[in-house]
Image (cartoon, grey):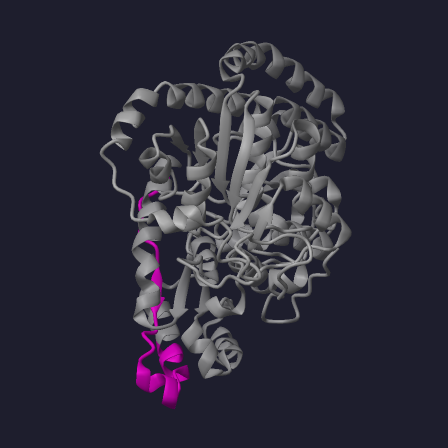
Amino acid sequence: MSQISIKEPSVVIREKRLGTINAFTGAASEIVEQSAKGQLKDCKRKFSQCLGCNQQQAFCQLAMIRDAVVIDHAPIGCAGEFADFNFTYRVEQARRDLPPALGRYFCTNILEKDTVFGAAKKLEETIRLAYDRVHPNAIFVTTSCASGIIGEDIEAVVDQASKELGIPVVTCTCEGFRSKIWTTGFDAAYHTVLRGIVKPAEKKTNKVNIINFWGSHVFDDIVRRFGYEPQYIIPFSTVEELSHVSEAAASIHICPSLSTYMGAGLNQLHDVPEVLVPPAYGVAGTDRWLRAFGKLVGKEEIAEEIIKEGHEKYVPEIDKLKEKFKGKRAYVTAGAAHGQALITLLGELGMDVVGAAVFHHDPVYDSGDDKLDILGQAVKNYGDVPDYRVCNKQACELVNALNRIKPDLILARHGGMTLWGAKFGIPSLLIGDEQFGIGYKGALNYARRIDDALDSIEFIKNYSKHASNPYTKWWFDQDPGYFQGDGSGKGCAQGRGGF
């Protein structure tokens, strides 16, 4: 178990805290075995097409706290993400029947001269400006590579501002260069909330924390069936609501890649128990999750009732569709925990998962409990994934692997990945809502969408005849892991690489 301390302003990065890596080539069984033995090593990548930024992931959580302001202490270029998240903010408000409002985001606009003479004054002025304009209930200051390089005492600025304004003003230390693992940004956001917003519990309530991105609220009916009230955090919480999450009866993980730090922090600091089983993907996975939650809250009989009803309502149609998927070969590309959950779901639907490209790999989560080993359970229950890649959005590796494997279906969580399948004439399915596949209904949702995607094969084949591909024959002649490891062109395997 990683010990979480909110005395420090900065979260310990995942490479050090969990041994997380972002490059690997091999079979899923290999990475599971090496993780369990503590032998997993990261690979150096000699070439990288793109990277996810810690600051962006921190911002995507803090930006959706409804009555807070986020100040990006950065050059104006780093504020390019404001528009994207403001769009998401408005769309997700509409889905929840919330009053329409713009996100409140500010940037200090660090210039070249500020890197020489300092930008602390700009930050002070921006904090006062944001407060005067918006009167928020909290202000979060996200750091950037530029502000990190300057090395100013941002903590002194925010502490003074908090005293002057009478609201929490908290630093979120999330410079992009701090960590190669993009999900460290989630940890930084949660560290900020745990440190500056969450108060010690005065009482315990019947609320259940659902640590969430912003997807569908699929847990509402389930949690209420057990006699509890769902509380989705962080998106669209208020500062006041977040200050009381320590009083919840339990915490639920939508995606352990996102929520491991917050769940463990609430457990260790405020004694809020976590549901420590993989997310409820697939029929067997949903059975397991419901029984774990029922046991945690002391209502096993309700779990068995829901399981019985779910099997009767959804499993017959799922079984019919499974017959159509026999012999079909699938490839998954997504974030780590969500991608691993999709491997489980596809295995249960009777498909052969022949490859995967996930964006990072956590050998262990902050709880330290191996019951959350999603990939290990998937390999145990549904067989190995022979071409398992830890590939932080490197399109060149994905394209090369797809060209070699030529699966019958590609399943993706993030935009920009499925177009490569179409170029090769492979039906592709992009589903961004991570909660779309949760529960018995979620398994049926995916089965139906997969069936529709496979029916599009003729259209996709025709499209591929007219599609261009920017990669040369030289690249397709190389191993997909060519830019990983020791230069042998064989990627990473046990004993190679290293920090």
Q: Residue 179 at what x, y percent from top left?
A: 54, 65
Q: How many marks?
A: 0
Q: Is residue 144 left or right of residue 22?
A: left
Residue at the (44%, 23%) spot, across then down: 450
Q: Quadrant of residue 191?
A: bottom right
Q: Is residue 141 above or below residue 112?
A: above
Question: Residue at 51% of width from left, 43% of height from top?
Answer: 357
For the C terminus, the quadrant is bottom right
Question: Which segment did they paint magenta?
Answer: 98-125
- Give the quarter of the image for residue 17: bottom right
On the image, the x and y values in percent for residue 40 come to 68, 55
The image shows residue 250 at horizontal and vertical percentages of 67, 41
What residue is at 49 percent from the left and 48 percent from the top?
A: 479
Q: Quadrant of residue 33?
A: top right
Q: Is residue 30 visible?
A: yes
| Residue that sits furthest to the left in the current view | 466
Near-viewer residue (210 or 224): 210
